[in-house]
Image (cartoon, rainbow, N blue to C red):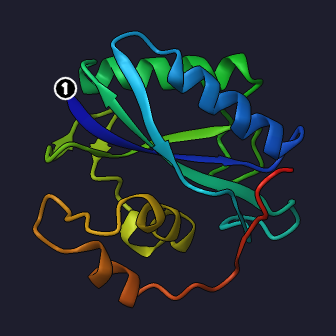
Amino acid sequence: MERVYIGLGSNLADPLAQLRSALAALAALPQTSLATQSSFYASDPLGPADQPRYVNAVAALDTELAPLELLDALQRIELEQGRMRKAERWGPRTLDLDILLFGEHRLAEPRLTVPHYHMHARAFVLYPLAEIAPQLRMPDGRGLDELLAACPFEGLERLPEPA
């Protein structure tokens, strides 16, 4: 069983509903349980500025799936929720699910790099991750607190919990 952290993001087709649906789908994956999830955060888009703000979160899963099996499952969830892969990078999307960390593993596969290659510079990943795993250490030994110190809480807004 491995502890895996998944980044979730959406800025189309009711992003709050997209993330809630994705979390339910993650919890239903075989050989996997949803351990915890962060609050939802609104964030400015990384790519073209003429798109809506994103809603982001991080989920912790405990899974027996292999990394590429999990990636395939995440991509199926994205497709089921209307994700269309386009050439445009960082454009608007209904759902984006990224494997941020997979236990202590470091992977460099053609389809998957773990730890996620830019997570250290993305506030919309680090702050939700710190909410659910504040003592987390990266596979290279750096603490999450060290990454947070170099990544200000800018362009982020923690959203209120639903009533």
In the image, residue 7 sits, relative to residue 20, either above or below, namely below
Tell me the quarter of the image containing the N terminus. Answer: top left
Q: 27 left or right of 88?
A: left
Which residue is painted at 73% across and 52% down in the image? 91
Farthest residue, direction left: 141
Front position in the image: 85 or 118: 118
In the image, residue 26 sits, relative to residue 102, either above or below, namely above
Where residue 118 sits, quadrant-wise, is bottom left
The type of residue carrying mark 1 is: Met
Q: Does residue 84 show up?
A: no
Q: 143 left or right of 132?
A: left
Q: Where residue 73 sits in the image (x, y, percent)?
A: 47, 18
Front position in the image: 90 or 151: 151
Q: Which residue is mark 1?
A: 1
Which residue is painted at 76% across and 65% down in the image? 159
Farthest residue, direction front: 163
Which residue is painted at 70% across and 16% down in the image? 80
Q: Where residue 119 sits in the image (x, y, percent)?
A: 41, 63
Where residue 54 sits, quadrant-wise, is bottom right
In the image, residue 142 sits, relative to residue 140, either above or below, namely below
In the image, residue 154 sits, relative to residue 105, either above or below, namely below
Q: Where residue 71 sits in the image (x, y, percent)?
A: 40, 26
Where residue 85 sits, quadrant-wise, is top right
**The residue tagged with tag 1: helix, strand or loop?**
loop
Q: Where residue 127 sits in the image (x, y, percent)?
A: 50, 71
Which residue is painted at 24% across and 21% down in the image? 66
Q: State how many labels appear.
A: 1
Q: Residues within 10 Å of mark 1 (few under 14, many from 20)?
A: few
Q: Does residue 43 show up?
A: yes
